[in-house]
Image (cartoon, rainbow, N blue to C red):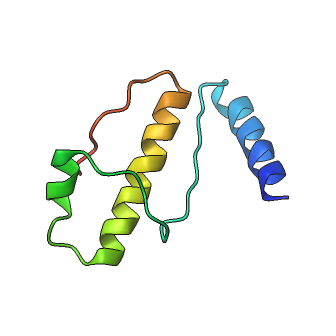
Amino acid sequence: MAVDRLDQMWAALGVVFGGDVSIAVTDPKVPQPVLMASEQSAVARAVPSRQLEFAAGRAVARTAMRGLGVTPCALPA
């Protein structure tokens, strides 16, 4: 059911923004892909839960970037 709602949201955003929309979701409590070097230094001193949240945000941002045809890059801040 959650996938259906996500598809509905994606379709609605496409109507509002003219189709150039990409969304991605993840669970910030599960392990994420390794951060790029500049991203790792941005959260090196953060508590582990914040590091997981940061990594999750970067992972979904890169997934959304790929959905728009943009080459994923580091997002350190």
Q: Is residue 70 left or right of residue 18?
A: left
Residue 5: image x %, image y %? 80, 53
Residue 48: image x %, image y %? 30, 76
Rendered residue at 59%/25% (across/down) = 20
Q: Is residue 6 above or below residue 18?
A: below
Q: Is residue 33 left or right of residue 63?
A: left
Rendered residue at 16%/47% (across/down) = 38
Rendered residue at 39%/51% (across/down) = 33
Asked whether 74 or 14 is in front, the reply is: 74
Q: Is residue 46 above or below residue 62?
A: below
Asked whether 6 or 35 is in front, the reply is: 35
Numbered-mark total: 0
Residue 12: image x %, image y %? 76, 39
Q: Is residue 10 left or right of residue 54?
A: right
Q: Is residue 51 left or right of residue 12?
A: left
Question: Which residue ends up furthest to the top in the rendered image?
Answer: 69
Q: Is residue 19 above or below residue 51?
A: above
Rendered residue at 32%/51% (across/down) = 34
- Tell me the quarter of the picture where residue 56 sits: bottom left
Asked whether 72 or 23 is in front, the reply is: 72
Residue 1: image x %, image y %? 85, 58
Asked whether 36 or 74 is in front, the reply is: 36
